[in-house]
Image (tube, rainbow, N blue to C red):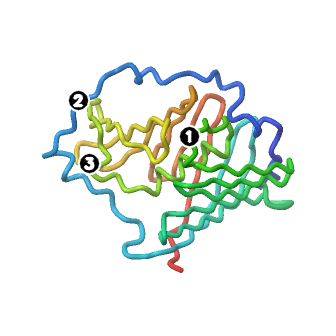
Amino acid sequence: MPAAAPWTSGARRIFEGLGLALLCGACQTFDPPDPGWSARYAEPDPVPEALAWTRSGLLDADSEALSGLFVVALAVERIPETRIRLQLFPEIGGKVLDLEVSSHALHALLPYTAEELTLDLQDDAPLPRHLAVLMGITLLEAHQPLGAARILGQRKNPGGFELLLEPRLAGVRVVALVDPDGRLLGRDYAFRGVRWTERLTDQGTEVEARRVRIHITLDPPVVR
């Protein structure tokens, strides 16, 4: 296993050099949600009735800001609200990221750059363009059930449907991709001119943006 490269100064400005392209789909319209179809959509709960769980795994990153193979430690709590903590460890050396996020706050520590980020997510102030913010957005959406109440619009695509969702954080555009039976295939994101995708496969989760690729595999949850 190659040693992971530490975070570079590129981590201070999320995905710098990506081109900051807007989602071309942003100008396309969605139809109103079909109550008969969206009501039968139900994302399976990874840990039914559990209030807290942990997962471990591997994260393989290829980007200017983060590169290499990292051990993942993920912890999720549901009470009093969903709170997620993600830690990344390289094969050699200390922790490279400690990220905690809920719908109210985000705190990130990047030891290699001695950088610390604390944000009130309920504040009306614009969120900074920072890698930790994008990771926090993705984690929040990945742990938010896609019930019918969140669907603002829908449209067909060759593989099923695209669902425009009410986001966990204001200012974020989230489109879920589902197959004709309502099974979640992934999500498309847009935030402050940056776009990225999340795809769920049998081999794990792929997160991609321009010049950024992250592959994550997680073990089954362990209830705490």
Residue with the mark numbered 3: 182
Comparing labels 1 and 3, the label whose residue is closer to the camera: 1
Q: Quadrant of the C terminus?
A: bottom right
Residue with the mark numbered 2: 31
Identify the amino acid type marked 1.
Asp
Label total for image: 3
Comparing labels 2 and 1, the label whose residue is closer to the camera: 1
Q: Secondary structure at mark 1?
A: loop
Residue at image point 38% right, 76% down:
49
Nearer-N-terminus badge (2/1): 2
Q: Position of residue 148 (x, y in %)?
A: 26, 50
* Tag 2–tag 1 contact (CB < 8 Å): no
Q: Position of residue 219 (x, y in %)?
A: 54, 67
Q: Quadrant of residue 73?
A: bottom right
Identify the amino acid type marked 2.
Asp
> Badge 1, how many Cα within 10 Å: few under 14, some, many 20+?
few
In the visual, does 110 lie left or right of 76? Answer: right
Q: Position of residue 14 (x, y in %)?
A: 69, 35
Q: Secondary structure at mark 3?
A: loop
Q: Quadrant of residue 70?
A: bottom right
In the visual, does 71 lie left or right of 3? Answer: left
Nearer-N-terminus badge (1/3): 1
Marks 2 and 1 sit apart, C-alpha to C-alpha, by 29 Å
Relative to the observer, which residue lies in front, 23 or 129? 129
Comparing labels 2 and 3, the label whose residue is closer to the camera: 2
Marks 1 and 3 sit apart, C-alpha to C-alpha, by 34 Å
Residue with the mark numbered 1: 124
Residue at image point 61% right, 47% down:
135
Identify the amino acid type marked 3.
Gly
Q: Position of residue 51 (x, y in %)?
A: 46, 75
* Tag 2–tag 3 contact (CB < 8 Å): no
Image mark for residue 214:
none
